[in-house]
Amino acid sequence: MESLIYLIPAALFLGLIGLAGFMWSLRSNQYEDLEGATYRALFEEDDIEEEQKEKSNTKG
Amino acid sequence: MFRIEHFVVEGLHCPKCIREIEGTLGENDKIKNARVNLSTQRLAVEWKEAVEDTLQNSEEVISALEKIGFKAFPFKTTNAQLEGDKVGKSLLKAMAVAGFAAANVMLLSVAVWDGGEMNESTRSLMHWVSALIVLPAATYAGMPFYKSAWNALKGRRLNMDVPISLAVILTCGMSLFQTYLKATETYYDAAVMLLFFLLIGRFLDQKMRNHARSVAHNLMSYKESKATLLHEDGHTEEIATEMLVPNQIIQVIPGGKIPADGTVISGMSDIDTSLVTGETVPQKAEKDTEVFAGTINVNGTLNIKITSTTGNTLLDEIIELMETAEQGRAKYVRLADRAASIYAPLVHFLAAATFLGWLLFSNVGWQGSLINAIAVLIITCPCALGLAVPVVQVVASSRLFKSGILVKAADGLERLAEVDTVIFDKTGTLTLGQPELANADDENVTPFNLELAAKLAKTSSHPLCRALIVACHDRDIPTIATESEIHEEPGMGLKATVNNITVKLGNREWCGINQNYLPNNRYSELWLKAEGAKPVLFCFKDRMREDALDVVHWFLRRQLKVILLSGDRKDVVDEAAEELGLSRYKYECKPQEKIEIIERIKASGDKVLMIGDGINDAPALSAANVSISPSTAAEVSQNAADFIFQSQKLDSVVRAYQVSLNSRKLVFINFALAAIYNMIAVPFAAAGLLTPLIAAIAMSLSSIVVTANALRLNFQKLYRSHEG
């Protein structure tokens, strides 16, 4: 039973990390656009930069 | 200071849209950040620095988006919107805290329930740790309920939150007392689990309302709110409608909406007043004609001198009528609150009886009696009742949303289920507000004449010309514009030379036809006059929605009273009523009359559903028990309506009614399930046989049963009028 002395705090601590993570995601507006997020995951950052370069090139 | 501006973007649906919009706006140096929200169909633009003239900058964004094929509208965030978002977030936070506490306490509770070998001091430790988790969590997560319960009590009412708050507070208090006494049984887990389940229901309810509000708000933003101001030196300027003042002169192009009441000072055109009066035949407008805000200029540019603006236009009179009508509307008490007003006193009575029973007829003392009384409160706590209504409502509105109906008012479904009289407006509701050739059987309306008329009509954007072209398409008549020059006289008609013959297409005056020849005040008319030939009359009437007849009959078959109230002329309404087989109808109704009729029906005890779209229907929509508008309706009407449907078809109305009936049935079944559960559980609790384990199982089981029951709504077969 002595193990409870550190097991209970450990369990609570892990739970609190989860709670804090959720609160952080809520505060940083990650639930604002659930639909868009599913697509954004598929964007390649490099592609976007390249596209923009191309556009500015054609303009110039 | 940075500022963020919001836009509603039409036709946002794919990942490519996000990238195109964000990429294009990213090139603008003034914009720090542009972000598209696909769920809300909105775009947030953050400017690099505080910008002075917002109108001009918004224009820049709108025109940039127009270039890549998106139509954007400025979006004004309202306080209600922000408040709604905030409430949603705080509920989500409360839910997370309750969930965290429930999971962790359950971990400890299960150990205690199982703990055969657990000694007293360990159990006591477990209880104290539970208390440490639950007391702050229940204080925080229960706030929404405590506040609402307190407000209800202050107003001397009972709502569902009163027994909920009481149960949570007493459960925590009793458990703390038990912990202090080092007793075996505490109910910490029950308290937070209860909060967790209820918060799920509360959050879903809030989310549904926010969604409805946000979609309704988007619909509003799609409306233009610009006017073209004509300066004395002849140059024009675009300004917001709110900026207009009397005596200014504005220019309205064909197809444009007239932004304020005024008098025509030059130009000639037809005015479509159907949205304001319900009348389908366009009115002629020339110098000195009075025109009203909200009507549409059909052909020909008009210069209008404003006589009154926001605050004293026809529209404002309507809004005033609307507000009076709303005040007369008896406040609807929601089913959940009605259930609570029966349930709460009963529960409190049972708990009190348990306390007295144990105190008088046993020797457990006041502490033991109190514990048993609280056990009754815990087990009867309306966990299932708290979920019974919101879960059904959320399932119902998401089902309806998928079939093109927006539930704007939270209690709209409940009110719709009680309806026994259905009142339809005609123009724009039963009909589409689009003209259709009405006299195709006439001997003069030959394919030859239609083809000749189409040669001229092809180039015009006048609605009647369009309708003529559609009529030709329906009959496989070629519509090729004549190669010779076509002259268009605004407000009059068209003229061209075809095969060396002068042909005119337009109104009676334009074609030089005597007023007494084929008199007509029932249809919109278009005359065709070829030199040397007999003039041909094309009549147009408002096109009935494809399924108007089916829908009206659906309601009649179910023994509901169906009434047609229209602001249109007698002949037109007579014909429409006959076509639909309606015996009860009234024509040339003023907004005031519509309200009076509805009040009379309501006074006789019937519940009225009003379906309408025009500005003239808005007061009636507010006066009725429940109301539905198409998304093409005027802004005020959409504001007044409880439901909005986005479809060319009317069958949405039937679907909304079906879902509302089924929802009510499911809510009652849920209430019954909750009652049965209580009848079984209360005797155990009152007898002092309740253990924390049984409480936990009973509570979660009843919530699951109620939720599963609500999901059955998805299996209901909904009405669809047959295609084509």
Image (spheres, coloured by chain):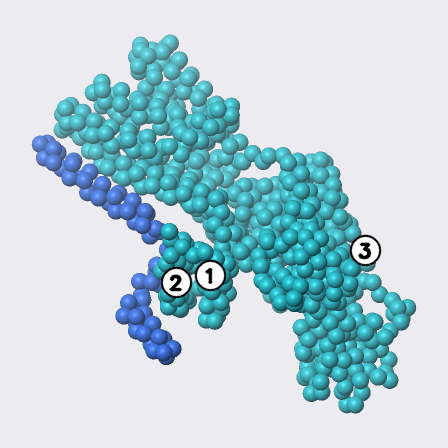
**Marks 2, 3 in one chain:** yes
Q: Residue at x 44, y 35 (%)?
A: B385
Residue A28 percent coordinates (x, y): 31, 50
User: Which chain is home to disc 3?
Assistant: B
Residue B211's place in the image compared with B724, above or below, is above
Instruction: Out of B459 and B160, give the one closest to the viewer.
Output: B459
User: Which chain is home to disc 1?
Assistant: B
- The secondary element bearing badge 3 is classed as helix
The three-letter amino acid code for the residue at tag 3 is Lys
Q: Is residue B640 left or right of residue B509?
A: left
Q: Are marks 1 and 3 in contact (CB under 8 Å)?
A: no
Report the residue marked by disc 1.
Answer: B57
Residue A15 location, quadrant? top left
- The secondary element bearing badge 2 is classed as loop
Residue B30's mark? 2
Residue B716's place in the image compared with B471, above or below, is above
Residue B111 location, quadrant? top left
Give the label, 2 or 3, closer to the camera: 2
What whole-number distance in Å separates the C-alpha atoms at marks 1 and 3?
A: 50 Å
Which tint is chain A? blue
Report the residue marked by disc 3.
Answer: B570
Name the quadrant of the C terminus of chain B.
Answer: bottom right
Residue B523 percent coordinates (x, y): 79, 65
